[in-house]
Image (spheres, rainbow, N blue to C red):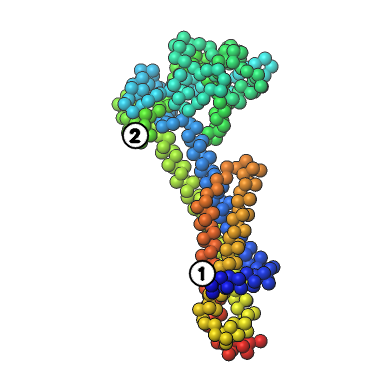
Amino acid sequence: MAILQSIKMALRSIKGNKLRSALTMLGIIIGVSSVIVLISIAQGSTSNVTSQINNLGTNLITLNTFGTELSLTEDKIDKLGKLDGVKALSPVVSGRVTVKKEKTSAQTTLTGTNSAYGTVRNTNVSQGRFLTDLDNEYRQKIAVLGATTAETFFGSDNPVGQYIQVNGTSFKVVGVLASKGSSMGQSGDDVVIVPLSTAERLTKTTSINQVYLQGKEKQDMNLVMAEVQNAMANMYPNKTDSYSIMNQQDLMNTMSSVSNTMTMMLGGIASISLLVGGIGIMNIMLVSVSERTKEIGIRKAIGAKRRDILLQFLIESVVLSAMGGIIGILLGLGVGKILGSTLQMTVTFSSSVVMFSFLFSLIVGVVFGVFPANKASKLNPIQALRYE
């Protein structure tokens, strides 16, 4: 009951000095809202990067070769596809080509690959179909367009069954990819996909410098990675500097580590403003003790114990910080949503972050309220009554 009475007295004191109380809470409000907004933006960025990496494919291993010293041949690629842990494999020939449709012309990325590309790279078709093994075997002049490429040349029309010119050669459009957006800074929608054999003839090269491999199980990706490395070392001895093998999971772990570090740093920076708000609470509570010295003396004279005075001022400090924390949470959530909608940012709110911010504001209120409360509780009642 004494605590409830102390809370009522604290609220009455705050209400009696509205402007001063509002300015005191301002530091806590800014601190809590800053923690929520900054960490939510950081977590949103993390989830966005994770989504982009997942768009690259599932259980993906990427093999790249450099220069002309090492060129992957079909028989060597077939050996990689027969490894125990490899579920599917997709060699790629890529380059820049000029695509024309009547009066519209543009430079677009060309990707020559096989039918497994859709599975390995997690690519879906929104219209028509994807490449087949027969298309590759018979060097068919067909193309699957990315969402952006299809819109550029056909607008809202259905491109399936129509023709485009790729470097002067006519290609029949058989499918359109579902939009994937940007992945790792590169657009996955501005592309023309053709059969691998057709792309080799179109780009006048039989050199395959990139292969995507899909592992069977996520938990076995390190073993699959080792299998691919051993196979490459056996097929191309003393040429480890001429190729690189990248595991998607390693990339995700690296990005997660960087994102977690950034989140902690941003949270730490925002928490500094909470400490500044705590100093403001201490300052105002010390002023309040000085102003209410006679009140303290009267309470002690009629029997209030040191514990009662200490609890009164400590609760007042905690109530200030709690009210500031609640307002800060509401402000942080509001600002986060506004930033997410206006700046097209990915903002991910976490209940644990909101709770942590609020609890931290309460701790700040307790820590910085102890000294003024202790000072008030130690006042001599006779001297307090004589205080002017």
Sequence-wise, the earlier of marks 1 and 2 is 2
The x, y position of residue 242, in whole percent, is 39, 29
Q: Amino acid at mark 2?
A: Asp
Q: Which secondary structure lies at badge 1?
A: helix
Q: Which residue is mark 2?
A: 220
Pick whichever, 29 or 69, lies toward us. 29
Residue 267 visible in the picture: no
Observer-nearest of 99 and 225: 225
Horizontal side of 78 relative to 124 (left or right) equals left
Badge 1, how many Cα within 10 Å: few under 14, some, many 20+? some
Q: Are marks 1 and 2 in contact (CB under 8 Å)?
A: no
Q: Position of residue 208 (x, y in %)?
A: 44, 21
Nearer to me, 89 or 99: 89
Q: Which residue was labeled with disc 1?
A: 367
Question: In the drawing, does residue 241 fall left or right of residue 348?
Answer: left
For the question of whether residue 217 can be seen, the reply is yes
In the image, residue 322 sits, relative to residue 231, either above or below, namely below
Q: Quadrant of residue 128?
A: top right
Residue at figure coordinates x 58%, y 83% from the top left: 299
Label 1 – label 2 distance at C-alpha: 50 Å
Give residue 19's position: percent from left, percent from top.
Answer: 69, 68
